[in-house]
Amino acid sequence: MKSLLFLVLISVCWAEPHPDNSSLEHERIIHIQENGPRLLVVAEQAKIFSHRGGNVTLPCKFYHEHTSTAGSGTHKIRVKWTKLTSDYLKEVDVFVAMGHHRKSYGNYQGRVFLRESSENDASLTITNIILEDYGRYKCEVIEGLEDDTAVVALNLEGVVFPYSPRLGRYNLNFHEAQRACLDQDSVIASFDQLYDAWRSGLDWCNAGWLSDGSVQYPITKPREPCGGKNTVPGVRNYGFWDKEKSRYDVFCFTSNFNGRFYYLIHPTKLTYDEAVQACLKDGAQIAKVGQMFAAWKLLGYDRCDAGWLADGSVRYPISRPRKRCSPNEAAVRFVGFPDKKHKLYGVYCFRAYN
């Protein structure tokens, strides 16, 4: 017991000569250090807004409680940024720094660095933002046995849109839904993105996959085929379903783009293959569904001409409702998936900027 007590004491105590009796080595003042200043990590903003292609800094600073110092000086500071997922037991590594050592991970490589505007600044700068960067990030600072964390949400300006393939309603399992969104210059939407879209007026009666594996749909105008006309507006939740076997539509999310979306002026209407070639001849590619939604929502693009898109669908964007052109609401109007070889329409093209 005495040995145990001695070991405990030497871990928290040290001695120095008494200033008035320095020649008496057996006299000492005993200092007992209990709890030192606690490490605190703070995010000055809990939510940051940006857009695809932009640069953003996620704020994070660290202090010691009741002091203005950044670190104790006895241990190296380790800063780790991770991205949180819908599975709270899993995190995606983004960036780690300790002393002069730096490492970034995955598709963040070459795009992230610490701002380091001061000795206690652990803020992370992300450049050339992509759609997949959307989400919640954790800043963790470690000094010896002390550590603390802060969480910052990165939101992207964009638009959520429902999507189903040529096969029709409820034909996508979760993994096919992810690919379908990627094929249309978008990513599968999160619940928060769908909720924000619902608050902005999105009303859709078909249930679709979300990024967390749940199946939901937004209703602003309750009616009989969509949960009942006596129900309250909201985002209806079907719950979590088998990602391999269950089949639904999907809600996709896209943001602004670095390029030009336009309706190709052409002397004749075109089959699908002719439309693809016409865009190529004009130095562009046939546009994707996500690019049309982004142009409509974020740029106010308005055109009353139905045109082919890359997935073989025919649509047209109306931002100014008028007679014969979506008279009741601003929307991207869906004509359908016509016969590619025999039906004739215009075409929407997209030319990327270098």
Image (cartoon, grey):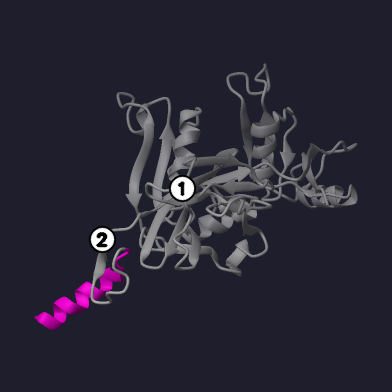
What type is the residue that disc 1 sits on? Ser
The residue where tag 1 is placed is 68
Q: Using the image as rendered, state which of residue 164 and residue 64 is in the foreground.
A: 64
Asked if the stretch drawn in magenta spans residue 232, the answer is no
267 with respect to 49 (left or right): right
The residue segment tinted magenta is: 1-19
Q: Residue at x 45, y 41 (%)?
A: 192
Q: Which residue is mark 2?
A: 34
Residue found at the far top of this picture: 323
Total count of labels: 2
In the displayed image of the protein, which residue is found farthest to the left? 1
Which amino acid is tagged 2? Answer: Glu
**Mark 1 or mark 2, which is nearer the start of the sequence?**
2
How far across and down, in percent of the image, does residue 60 sit?
A: 50, 49
Q: Is residue 52 left or right of residue 139?
A: right
**Which part of the image, by quadrant, shows the N terminus?**
bottom left
